[in-house]
Amino acid sequence: MAIPTHRLCVYCGSGPGRNPAYMQAADDLGIAMAKADIGLVYGGGGMGLMGQVARGVLSAGGHVTGIIPEFLVNRERMLEGVSELIVTNTMHERKTMMFEKATGFVALPGGVGTLEELAEITTWAQLGQHAKPLIVCNIENYWDPLLVLLNHMRAESFIRAGMEVLVEVAKTAADVVPIYQHRRSVTVDKVPLKIIQDKL
């Protein structure tokens, strides 16, 4: 299967979470991406939302690239049957490859790891290192506390004029693909991967 031109990197939990709506959203997002010919770039695991979004893409005939560091292969139960599987030596190598292969980023509900990945890729955008779409999928208002915090940072002038970033908010999984497509139509990538690599 040819690698799609458009590929969303999805950050999400390796567990299912408390609310069944989270797993449903992961499945819905995966199917919607495949139907729009948007490939998935993700952490390579087979558990929780991470595994569900990948299975959703695959179930609809889409392309999945899993990128997982060697030390997590057993812990996160690496998903077999993906279109492309890359095992890295380190987390830093994994993050760089995910950035390189993705044309946009989405955060579904998740834990500290998901938050850290979202914060890092948002910081890179804030510092002018890329202009790829950033989307928070706010299922059942999961990300409301983060959105409140971002507004607080703006109010307290820690996110200042000239340092703003556009993080789009999708209320449902169905909203993600249209938001991504619109952002890609008005934005172009602007910084080569080497600049990111040099910062690791």
Image (cartoon, grey):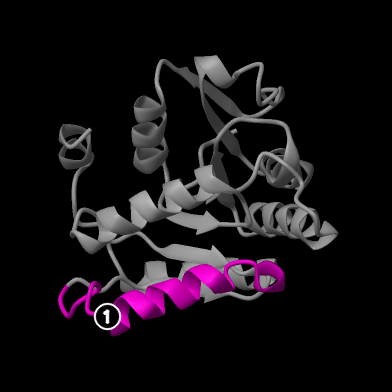
142 inside magenta stretch? yes
> In the image, is residue 60 above or below residue 144?
above
Q: How many marks?
A: 1
Q: Position of residue 134 (x, y in %)?
A: 42, 63
Residue at 39% over, 73% down: 150
Name which quarter of the figure residue 19 lies in: bottom right
**Which residue is under mark 1?**
156
Q: Position of residue 109 (x, y in %)?
A: 63, 57
> In the image, is residue 99 above or below residue 1?
below
Residue at 66% over, 29% down: 82
Which residues are the magenta region? 139-162
Q: Choose between 124 and 82: the one closer to the eye.
A: 124
Q: Quadrant of the C terminus?
A: top left
> In the image, is residue 48 above or below residue 86?
below
Q: Is residue 11 visible?
A: yes
By secondary structure, the bulk of the magenta-drawn segment is best described as helix
Query: Disc 1 marks which amino acid?
Result: Glu
Q: Quadrant of the N terminus?
A: top right
Q: Going by the image, does 104 lie left or right of 64?
A: left
Q: Position of residue 34 (x, y in %)?
A: 66, 52
Q: Choose between 113 and 67: the one closer to the eye.
A: 113
Per the image, label 1 sits on a secondary structure element best described as loop
Q: Position of residue 73 (x, y in %)?
A: 61, 18
Name which quarter of the figure residue 144 lies in: bottom right
Kindly give the residue lying farthest to the right in the view shown: 20
Q: Going by the image, does 92 lie left or right of 43?
A: left
> In the image, is residue 149 above or below residue 91?
below
Name which quarter of the figure residue 197 lies in: top left
Q: Going by the image, does 94 lie left or right of 1?
A: left
50 inside magenta stretch? no
